[in-house]
Amino acid sequence: MNDKREKCGICAADMPMENVFGPLYQMLNDLQHRGQAGAGISTYNPSRKIIIRTHKGGGKVPEVFRASDEREFKDISDRLEGPKGIGHTRYGTSGSLTSRHVQPFERVHGIKNKWFSFGFNGHITNRNDLDTRIGDLGFHLMLDTDTETMMHWISRYISENRDGDLKEVFSNLASDFDGAYNIVFQDADGRLVAIRDPWGFRPLSGTSSHRGAFVASETTALYRFGNGDIHHIRPGEMAILEDGCVRYERYAPGRRRALCFFEYLYFASVTSNIEGRPVYDVRKRCGEELANIETEQLNPKDWVIIPVPNTSRPFANAYARAAGLPEIYDEGLIAVAKGRTFIEEGDRSAKVMSKFLPIPSVLKGKKVIVVDDSIVRATTMATLIRYQLKGLGGAKEVHVRIATPPIISPCYYGIDLRCYEELVASRYMDNMEYGKLDEKSLTELAERIGADSLLYQSHEGLLRALSMEKDQICMACLNRDYPTPGGRAKDELEYSEFIKKKGDTCRGYAP
């Protein structure tokens, strides 16, 4: 497992007067940060024999759609020409990373309302139970992915629903499924919908203009197409795109709100707005909260404040300003490789070494405050400190400041934090109170990563930065307070195994 990995980005468009391929391609480019392992577009066109046609493959969006070759790109655009379609960028948290696992998934059928394609963002916690039940009904599962599970359950509910009511189909799905699942769906009858799960783990928004109707995981993918009026789709709500317009209807009751806090701090683009809160503003407030708990006496002569590119720039900039020393904010690390390391496979340390280069003229002989969004395994930070900042950069001291509280427990809702043993802070849960590590544990962990000191954001500081109550968001990876029955059941098993391996009692914190 490589640090944080999130699954995925979705989008949909209904454009009666245009070929939808170009806008979908643009939206996928704008959602590239949510997944770089694969991408796909599926379009609807009733004037062609193959009413739903899908093109997908492994790699980044421009690679999948051959953007470097004008002729090939145009050929794909022409093949996918149509007034409606959906798109997906993938990083998988289950299943291997073959082209067969890339979304959208398509189910071909001779009856048009049973022929559909869909893509989803999230993770199903009760998949084993669902697989057993759907298998007992005669469905055969070939792939190790919850996307295939979902495809068969959608197929089942469509077959059972004589009226073809998609609200009822997804209402039934919500009664069976536990976990995070935002879905874009279209069928060969021309119906196009997007749904947000009843807990609202992941963001989803819609907009419309004279060109048509659009839905995407993040608002950053909608700015080019709407009139500035963006609707943040509510948990349990469905967006119905037809005739170039979009309307919103509830398909399932909302449950306990559980928006993942990491969307604001890491996954979402800094240009996005989630449920009325600009991501950039939240990250700035996190930096200010960090400055409020600073214990070192900083001065312009000896100190420099740097971010870990690129997510942490707003944190570090606001931290420096709140500390009253904006002049000592600088860029001590440069990202020299494209992409986000957390969604790449292979040796983590090697990726970090190849991705960043230090700037010795900024770092040499200085006491460095390095600001990052989180520590998961600690592999990244340890490599940065020992080999980049102190080794190549010549920093005199390195003091680490983390914008989130300690990550102590796995995520079962779509982020690859799935094992207690892999989380460096989980071994210190005995020494936590109200989500804070004691001084001894902080010192030990700092030594482990080669830092001269380490400070984490507090739970209270995070909530203030988010301007949200804790019952509105999911912070399960920080406090083991899982919002769904499936998540709690899964964690009971994982935590019991962790305690057995740990060999002693471990008092997990839950507020």
Image (cartoon, helix red, strand yellow):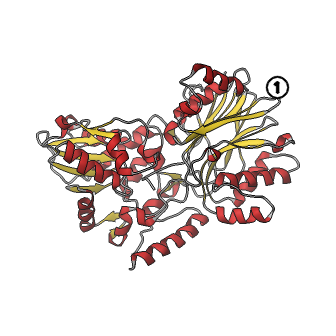
Residue at image location 51% in from the left, 70% down from the top: 494
Residue type, numbered disc 1: Ser
Residue 444 placement, left or right of 227: left
Residue at image location 29% in from the left, 51% down from the top: 383
Q: Quadrant of the N terminus?
A: bottom left
Residue 28 visible: yes
Spot occupied by residue 359 in the image (x, y as percentages of width and height): 22, 36
Relative to 235, does residue 230 appear above or below in the rendering? above
Residue at image location 54% in from the left, 72% down from the top: 493
Residue 380 placement, left or right of 65: left
Q: Which residue occupies the foreground of this view, 467 or 154?
A: 154
Relative to 201, does residue 304 appear above or below in the rendering? above
Residue at image location 36% in from the left, 63% down from the top: 425
Residue 399 placement, left or right of 34: left
Relative to 200, does residue 481 appear above or below in the rendering? below
Relative to 153, does residue 334 appear above or below in the rendering? above
Q: Could you say whether the residue bearing mark 1 is in a helix, strand or loop? A: loop
Mark 1, residue position: 47
Spot occupied by residue 462 in the image (x, y as percentages of width and height): 39, 52
Residue 435 visible: no
